[in-house]
Structure formats: C-alpha cells, structure tokens
C-alpha cells in the first residue's frame, strides 16, 4: 500500500499540480480511507504511518522542500483520520446492507467537513509562509480532495465488497460491458469536440449504468467520465476549451465541478436503488421462505403472484395457481369467502377469511386468509389484495376437540348433584350448570351476565357478600347456608375457589354448592341418638346434665325454685338374675312409661343408667308438689309389670331435693342422692324429701 500511495502522490503532483499551487486531482486520501475501513483499529497506526511516510518521501523525491512536503502530508493524515474514524464509529460493519443509508450520509458529511479542515490548514500555510492566494489554494484543494475521496474511496469500498462484481454481477458481465462502452463512446463524442457544450449527454448512460448495476456501475461510470474529461482538459480540448479566456486552473475547476455533479447525480440514485433492492430482496425472501402462503390477487380471487409456500400448504406449484381456483374451495364456503374478499376490496377494512380448500393430494384443509387492500400495479382494477394464508387444520381440529371436551364437561357438570358456577371479577355469572334450573326453576341463560345481586336478590347477596369479596381477593371460602328461600329451603354448603390466572390476575371464583340436607338430617338423628336412651326413649345422662345446667342458670337468673328427683328400682338386680335381661329391659321400659305419665310434658325425665332415673321440675311452687309426684308414681307401680310373661311387682325408692337457692348441679344432685339413700334406708318403695 505504501508503494501505491507513493506512486499516486508522485503522479498527482507531477500531472495535476500547477506551479506554486496544489494538485487538482488527489486520490491518495480516498485509497487510504478505503483500506482503513476494512481493517481492525489495531492495524490503523501502522497503515497511517506507512501512508504518511510514503507521501512524504514521494513529495521530497519530487523536489518539494521538507516544510512544504510536511504540512500537506499532515493535512492529508488529519483528513484521513477524521473521515475513516467518523465512518467506523457510526457504521462498524460497512458491509451491512441495512446500514447503507447511514454509511452514505456519514461518509458524505465527514468528507465535506474533513476536506474543509485540511483545505483551511494548507491554504493558511500557503498564504502565510508562501504568499500564495488563500482562496485559490482553498478551493483547489477542497474540490480535488472531495471528488477524489468520493470517487476513489467508494471505488475501493465497492471493489472490496463486490470483488468480481465490480465489472458486473455473474451473468451480467456482457450487459455491464455494453453499458460501459456506451458511456465511453458518448464521453468520447462529448469530450473530443469543442464546438458545443454537450456535457449533459453523459448523464443518460451514467444513469443507465447506475440503474442496471448499482454502485459498481456508478464507480466505473464516474471513473470513465473523470478519466475521459481529465485527458480532454489536459489536452485543452473538449467543451471546457470553449472558454478561451479561461486559464487551465479555471478549466480544472470546471472539470472538478462536472465530475462532482456526476457523483451527486449518480450516488444518491445508486443508494436509493440499493436500499430498494435490499428491501425488495428481504420481502421477497420473507414471502418465498415463509411457511405462510402469500398471494397477490384481484378482488375476484385471480392471483398475480403466488409464493413458493403453496408447495407445502396445498401441494401445488406456484404456476398452477396463477388463476382463480374456486373449484378447489369447499362449495359450502365459496359464497362467504368470495363476499369477504369483495368486501375487503370495497371497504379496505381487513378481516380474517376462513374456508376449506382441497389439497392436491385430495384431502381438504382449513385455511385462514388475512387480506389487505393495496393499489393495483399491473391491472386495470384500482385495488388488489395481498393475502397471507396459513393452514389451520390442526387449530380447527383442536377447536373441534375443545368443543367436544366442553360438551362433555357440560354434560358432567349438569348431571353432578351440585350447583356449579363461575363468577367473574365483576361478580357476574359467566357459567352455571343445569342444577340451578332444577333447584330454583331459573334458566341458565337468564343468569349468565347478571351480577349475583341481580340474579339472587339483595337479601341473599348481603348474606354472601363477605364470602364473595374474599374469594375474589384470592381467599378460599367454605360455609354452610341455613334453609331459606335463597337455598330452596335446603341446607347447602358452598365452596368458593379463587380463579387466579398464571400471571397472578384474579379472574373471579368457582362456586361449588352441595345440598347437605340429608347430611344435616343424619347429624340431627345422630345428635338425637346421642341424647336419648335407646331402651326407654327417655333422655340420657348427657341430655339430662345439659338440661340441668340450663335450668340452674334460669333459676339463678329468675330466683325460682328447682326440684330434682332421683329414682332407683328396688331389687332390680334380682330381677335380671332371676328372669334374665330381657325381663329386666321390659321392667325398665314399663317403669319409664309410668314415670313419664306421672309428670308434665314440660318436666325433664331421663334414664341416667342401669335402673337409675331422674326427674327435673323447674316451676314447683312447694315441696308438696314433689311429694304428689312421688305418691302418684308409687301408686302407678303397684300394678304388676308384664316381663317376658312374668307378672312382677316392682317398687321404687325416690330421693327428692327441693331448693330455692341452688348453688350448683353437683350440690343439688348431692342433696337428691342423700334423700334417695334415706328412702332406701327407710324400707324402700317410698320417698324422702330434703328442702334447702
């Protein structure tokens, strides 16, 4: 590269520099910038040092003094660093097609600025130390460096990027050569005559070369123009020679301006074409390799472009589909699909179009087509449609399977003996099963979309609102509901399960409500069994103890007396031992019946266990009431008891405790026990009374 820089420097000085001025053509900076843009930063110092040294040596060998050689070399080095550094900073990879526009704008801007800085530096030096005209040096340097940078740096970059494509893409070499020779011929015709200013004629073949071959055509065309115009100017021939009174420097300025104009015309066109080709290639690649079928068609469904994806979507070749193929569409779907396409073409409002179409192998597939209306390009119609179609057969199968699953789930939920519902975050029913209609007589469709308050009433909502709010906020709720109008007069148990989305959003809750009326009835039956003596149907000790505690509480609260009677059957063990337990059970049942008949319905009668019985009277006004009950019972027991065919005479001992200031159940029971003990000691079949 040092040899190329040195040789280029020598040639530019020797052929294009007027005495005491600067070169009117300068390509060295463009060469170095083009090389740097393809090098890593680590190699830049060596490359810059070699270029600086080569230029400095070439200037000295040409006869320039050291000082006169050093300042331009420094200016060129600064210019190169500024341009290459700006481009590398904005576009690290200049081969990236996506950054082409950024590359062009950055290169243009940095070139104009950097060449201006170097021109100011050299012109100032020449004006101060060599007494040369500042403006002449500034303009000559600036135009020579800008044009050289634009042409040569671009040539180097394109040559590195295009490589063999610099003379046309493969298969396009002949076309490139013909276009280049056409440009060369017109350049020769323009610049080998000096009778008319026909410079504009070269723009047509230059643009032709640009349109057909892009940047390679631009660079090659501008080089051809620059060389041809340069030779013509050096020979004082061509259109510039028409200015007879102008100097060679003026002709050189005109040459630079003309070449610059050619660059300004061709490079933007090449940039736009390159971007357009890149976007077109990108979208063509997307269309050609997309798994979705892309079709450009008329509103009637006649395609003008079919992407290769049709091979795997429908099994056809694109050429087989370049006409309307309504014959492949399911007859049941033709009308709605055709109307949809016509509607999209008429209104411009896109909508998905779904229909069935026959695959080349004979089976039908479902396709979903997304259409967009665009301006027609190659037809008489105003509008065309761009359609993207994809095979949705698996989706439709999944939808059918989902519908079937939903139907099964609906059948299951409708026949489960439970109320099942979903309530959304706004407290509206979004699902209810058939049990609601069976229990409440309300159709499910009349509940859907309504709030719980609207559907079930204000009173029921007030009862459930706290549970509803808790479930919506994410807390599971289980609660029982007593029989009333809102429950269909059943015992119900509700289970509210929060519906929480995977992202944590609360979507409402699921309500599962079971009829637990049989369970409640069973519980009541069990509770009754736990409190009733199975043999005599009287209350048992548990029932009696609870009643006694409640009675004592009432007596203390109201200051009323209590009467407690404890009874034992006399010689009951002997009956069991002599006649057996069945006979004993018969005696106990008969005694319980006679005992219950001797008291009021409001009095509490219980079998405490074995042959022990108890009577609790809450409103006995005097101890004599207890004695009256005792007398009545003893009289009732004088009649023999039929026990398994044996007529048995059974007596009873009775202990009575009467108190107006009861301390506790234990104290009252102790008094009655003592009275019972006294009755047994007194000869049995009698009673004793203790008044407290």
Image (cartoon, rainbow, N blue to C red):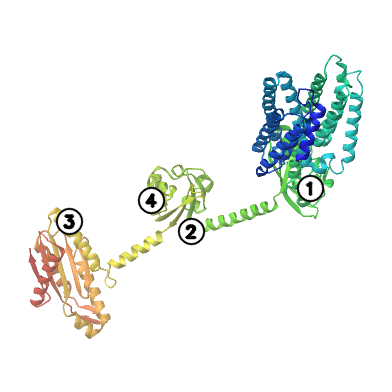
Q: Which residue is mark 3?
A: 554
Q: Position of residue 463 (x, y in %)?
A: 37, 47
In percent of the image, x 84 and y 42: which residue is there? 169
Which comes before the other along the chain, label 4 or label 2? 2
Q: Kindly check if marks 3 and 4 are in contact, taking CB atoms under 8 A apart as contact.
A: no
Which comes before the other along the chain, label 3 or label 4? 4
**Which image quarter is the C terminus in?**
bottom left
Q: Tell me if residue 276 can be seen.
A: no
Using the numbered discs, state the Cα–Cα distance from disc 1 to disc 2 in whole angstroms. 57 Å
Instruction: State whether residue 197 is above or below residue 310.
Output: above
Using the numbered discs, state the Cα–Cα distance from disc 1 to disc 4 in whole angstroms. 70 Å
Mark 2 residue element: loop
Q: Position of residue 21 (x, y in %)?
A: 76, 23
Which comes before the other along the chain, label 1 or label 2? 1
Using the numbered discs, state the Cα–Cα distance from disc 3 to disc 1 in whole angstroms. 96 Å
Q: Kindly check if marks 1 and 4 are in contact, taking CB atoms under 8 A apart as contact.
A: no
- Residue mark closest to the camera, 4 vs 2: 2
Residue 21 is labelled as none
Estimate how packed mark 2 is, as few (under 14), some (14 to 19) or many (20 or more) residues with alpha carbons within 10 Å. few
Residue 484 is labelled as 4
Q: Which residue is mark 1?
A: 308
Using the numbered discs, state the Cα–Cα distance from disc 2 to disc 3 in whole angstroms. 45 Å
Q: Residue furthest bottom?
A: 578
Q: Position of residue 406 (x, y in %)?
A: 58, 54
Instruction: State whether residue 344 is above or below residue 117.
Output: below
- Residue mark closest to the camera, 3 vs 1: 1
Using the numbered discs, state the Cα–Cα distance from disc 4 to disc 2 in whole angstroms. 19 Å
In this view of the protein, which residue sits in the foreground, 605 or 205?
Answer: 205
Q: Tell me if residue 563 can be seen.
A: yes
Using the numbered discs, state the Cα–Cα distance from disc 3 to disc 4 in whole angstroms. 31 Å
Q: Which residue is mark 2?
A: 417
In this view of the protein, which residue sits in the foreground, 433 or 392?
Answer: 392
């Amino acid at each position: 590269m040092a040899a190329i820089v040195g040789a280029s420097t020598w040639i530019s000085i020797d052929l294009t520099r007027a005495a005491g001025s600067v070169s009117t053509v300068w390509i060295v900076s463009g060469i170095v910038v083009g090389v740097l843009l393809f090098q890593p930063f680590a190699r830049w110092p060596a490359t810059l040092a070699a270029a600086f040294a080569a230029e400095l040596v070439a200037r000295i060998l040409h006869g320039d003094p050291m000082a006169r050689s050093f300042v331009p070399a420094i200016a060129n080095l600064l210019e190169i660093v500024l341009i290459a550094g700006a481009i590398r900073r904005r576009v690290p990879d200049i081969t990236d097609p996506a950054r082409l526009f950024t590359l062009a704008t950055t290169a243009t801007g940095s070139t104009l600025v950097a060449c201006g800085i170097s021109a100011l530096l050299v012109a100032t030096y020449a004006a101060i130390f060599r007494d040369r005209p500042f403006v002449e040096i500034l303009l000559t340097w600036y135009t020579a460096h800008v044009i050289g940078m634009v042409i040569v740096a671009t040539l180097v970059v394109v040559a590195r990027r295009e490589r063999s494509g610099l003379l046309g893409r493969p298969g396009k070499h002949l076309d490139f050569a013909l276009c280049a020779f056409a440009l060369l011929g017109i350049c020769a015709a323009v610049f080998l005559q000096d009778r008319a200013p026909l410079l504009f004629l070269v723009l047509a073949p230059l643009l032709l070369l640009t349109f057909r071959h892009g940047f390679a055509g631009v660079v090659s065309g501008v080089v051809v123009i620059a060389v041809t115009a340069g030779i013509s100017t050096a020979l004082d021939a061509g259109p510039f020679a028409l200015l007879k009174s102008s100097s060679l420097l003026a002709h050189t300025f005109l040459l630079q301006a003309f070449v610059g104009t050619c660059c300004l015309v061709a490079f933007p066109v090449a940039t736009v074409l390159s971007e357009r080709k890149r976007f077109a290639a990108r979208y063509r690649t997307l269309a050609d390799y997309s798994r979705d079928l892309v079709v450009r068609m008329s509103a009637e469904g006649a395609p003008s472009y079919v992407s290769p994806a049709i091979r795997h979507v429908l099994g056809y070749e694109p050429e087989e589909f370049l006409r309307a193929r309504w014959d492949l569409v399911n007859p049941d779907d033709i009308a709605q699909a055709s109307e949809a396409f016509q509607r999209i073409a008429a209104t411009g409002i896109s909508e998905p179009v779904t229909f069935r179409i026959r695959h080349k192998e004979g089976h039908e597939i479902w396709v979903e087509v997304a259409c967009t209306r665009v301006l027609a390009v190659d037809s008489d119609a105003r509008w065309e449609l761009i359609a993207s179609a994809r095979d949705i057969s698996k989706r439709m199968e999944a939808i059918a399977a989902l519908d079937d699953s939903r139907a099964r789930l609906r059948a299951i939920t409708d026949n489960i003996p439970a109320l099942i519902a979903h309530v959304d975050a706004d407290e509206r029913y979004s699902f209810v099963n058939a049990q609601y209609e069976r229990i409440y007589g309300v159709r499910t469709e009349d509940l859907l979309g309504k709030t719980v308050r609207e559907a079930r009433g204000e009173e029921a909502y007030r009862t459930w609102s706290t549970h509803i709010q808790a479930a919506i906020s994410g807390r599971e709720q289980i609660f029982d509901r007593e029989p009333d109008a809102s429950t269909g007069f059943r015992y119900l148990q509700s289970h509210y399960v929060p519906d929480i989305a995977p992202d944590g959003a609360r979507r409402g809750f699921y309500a599962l409500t079971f009829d637990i009326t049989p369970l409640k009835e069973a519980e009541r039956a069990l509770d009754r069994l736990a409190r009733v003596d199975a043999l005599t149907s009287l209350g048992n000790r548990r029932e009696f103890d609870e009643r006694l505690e409640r009675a004592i509480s009432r007596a203390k609260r109201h200051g009323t007396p209590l009467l407690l009677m404890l009874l034992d059957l006399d010689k009951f063990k002997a009956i069991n031992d002599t006649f057996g337990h069945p006979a004993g059970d018969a005696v106990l049942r008969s005694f319980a019946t006679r005992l219950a008949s001797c008291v009021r319905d409001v009095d509490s009668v219980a079998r405490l266990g074995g042959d022990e019985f108890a009577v609790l009277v809450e409103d006995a006004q005097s101890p004599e009431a207890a004695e009256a009950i005792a007398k009545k019972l003893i009289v009732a027991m004088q009649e023999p008891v039929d026990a398994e065919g044996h007529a048995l005479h059974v007596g009873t001992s009775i202990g009575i405790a009467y108190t107006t200031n009861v301390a506790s159940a234990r104290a009252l029971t102790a008094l009655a026990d003592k009275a019972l003990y006294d009755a047994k000691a007194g000869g049995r079949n009698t009673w004793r009374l203790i008044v407290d």
